[in-house]
Image (cartoon, helix red, strand yellow):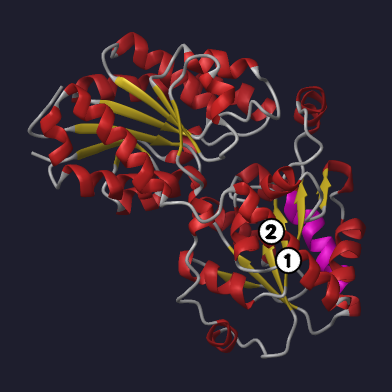
Amino acid sequence: MSVESPVITLVAGEPSGDDRGAGLARALRAGLGADLKLIGVGGPRMAEAGVTSLFDMSEISVFGLLEGLLAIPRVRRRAQEVARAAAREGADLVVLIDSWGFSWLAARALRRLAPGVRLVKYVAPQVWATRPGRARALAGLVDHLLVINSFEPPYFEAWGLPTTFVGNPALHMDFSSCDPADFRARHGIGAQAPVLLVLPGSRPGEVDRLLGPFEDAIRRLKTDHPGLQVVLPVADAVADRVRAAVAGWPFRVHVVDGEQEKREAMKASDLALACSGTVTLEVAQAGVPMVVAYRLGAVTYFVAKFLIRTPWVVLFNIAARDFVAPELIQGECNGPRLAAELDRRLRDPDLRRAQVAAQDAALDQVGRGGPDPSETAAKVILDMLSKDQPRLSSGT
């Protein structure tokens, strides 16, 4: 293992992983010093944190059965590329962030091409909801697992996999610098105008499947709520796709870019229409009631019905064991149903307040309020490295 210049490989395949990877990269550099070499795969946030990517993250960002099958040759090739680069650079440790399919392929390739490297999986497969056999498979492949949900360790420790709960970075979003009044003024939105926050996802497939019913729902809402303002923060990976789509909508959409603008948009909104995913935790922290929607490809959904063992999709709904926020999935994700749920909340401030309170209580059940996840994850990794070479822990 290298001593003078430690090498760590971080691999993320989607925007949420890019965020986690960026936080981890900064925490690792703080612990190991400026000489730390970070390579791997990530997006713009990991690049800002000093991670040199081997290729564009979108190459491995796939979701859905058919999309995944079509992408197998490319994803296998990229997994081999990650393993070869880790071996070539003499990586001391590799962190595979989320993206189960790619992580699995990359881990297997790493075990063949760089058998001595330590492997860490960051974010567990959701074995409590589907495919419990993945816990055993992962235990035979990686050295340590970092999980973001407090209830997950027993599922993997039962198979002998060292597992550490680090917390969810999405539960540590800082809204203290946000000024809702200033956001509204900058975008020409009246102080009393109702604002609908629209979050159509960060993957191309999500955007393509959700923007149609989202537009239909908003068009229906605008009939009864003509003053409704629509704000849509775009994820970097799908920004051009979203802008091109909403340019043809028959009403104005305030499209905003960047993390700070997204946070301010959340705080300035009265209600949200959100794609299921990490962003629902962020919206809940902002104190905004939401309607959650999702659509899978037809074949993927058919298969998923036989695999998923929970009636809920949203994490805080799972923790609360209740539909704290309504979930309109697949066939129910259509313009009339979405519009009806949104309309109920626009007309009833008491319903909005009750939902915000329930969402807030559910966030505590998910694990809000713990230590910084990036720092906790970095401490685990530093400890693993120090057991091989004590001087690494001090950055010398």
Magenta segment includes 301: no
Q: Quadrant of residue 80?
A: top left
Write down the region rendered in magenta.
210-221
| SS under mark 1 | helix
Where is residue 74? Give x, y as percent: 49, 24
Question: Looking at the picture, which amino acid does disc 2 mark?
Answer: Ala
Reply above or below: 360 against 121.
Answer: below
| Residue closer to the observer: 347 or 132 | 132
| Tag 1 residue | 357
Most prominent secondary structure in the magenta stretch? helix
In this view, 102 is above or below 221: above
Identify the image quadrant of residue 112.
top left
Q: Residue at x 49, y 33 (%)?
A: 60
What's the distance in space between the residues labelled 1 and 2, CA to CA?
Answer: 6 Å
**On residue 361, which mark appears?**
2
305 displayed left or right of 135? right
Local crowd at mark 2 within 10 Å, few (<14), some, or many (≥20)? some
User: Are the residues flagged by discs 1 and 2 in contact, CB closer than 8 Å?
Assistant: yes
